[in-house]
Amino acid sequence: MISNETDSFSECPLGRGNVVCRQVDDGFILYDSVAGKVHSLNPTAAFIWDALDGKHSLREISKNIESLVGSEGHDTLADVEKVVSLFQKEDLLEHSENLPR
């Protein structure tokens, strides 16, 4: 989980520019050319990845997902934070002093 003294849901993470997202037959993949790794994503995780442009907060991304899938009553924000934390753990995000490594 992303944790710091500020509101982590207000942070606007940015995916690394040299990581490529592609749709494949059964979902999506991220290819990290630096690490030589491929990561398999479901459609929701791919949507989150695409939104990591440094301009959208986790809260905004969560609200966009809720408006698309009507996930009322589900803790979408926690899910977004979990996915972004996994991206961070795999070093797929640009580094920021507000997002610990």
Image (tube, grey):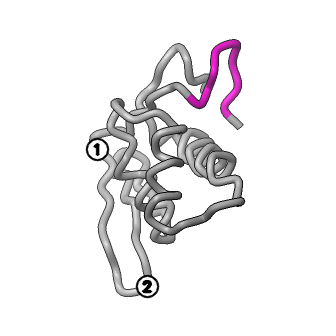
Q: Is residue 3 magenta?
A: yes
Foreground residue among 59 and 87: 59
Q: Is residue 72 left or right of residue 93?
A: right
Q: Residues within 10 Å of mark 2 (few under 14, many from 20)?
A: few
Q: Where's residue 2, x and y in %?
A: 66, 32
Residue shown at 71%/59% (left/top)? Answer: 73
Which of discs 2 and 1 lies nearer the camera? The answer is 2
Magenta stretch, residue numbers: 2-9
Helix, strand or loop at disc 1? Answer: loop
* Viewport quadrant of the N terminus: top right
Q: Which residue is mark 1?
A: 18
Crowd class of label 1 (few under 14; some 14 to 19; many from 20; radius 10 Å):
few
Q: Which mark is residue 26?
A: 2
Q: Residue at x 69, y 47 (%)?
A: 78
Check disc 1 and give the amino acid type: Asn
Q: Is residue 5 above or below residue 64?
A: above
Q: Is residue 74 left or right of 47 when viewed as pictured?
A: right
Quote the CA–CA distance across marks 2 and 1: 23 Å
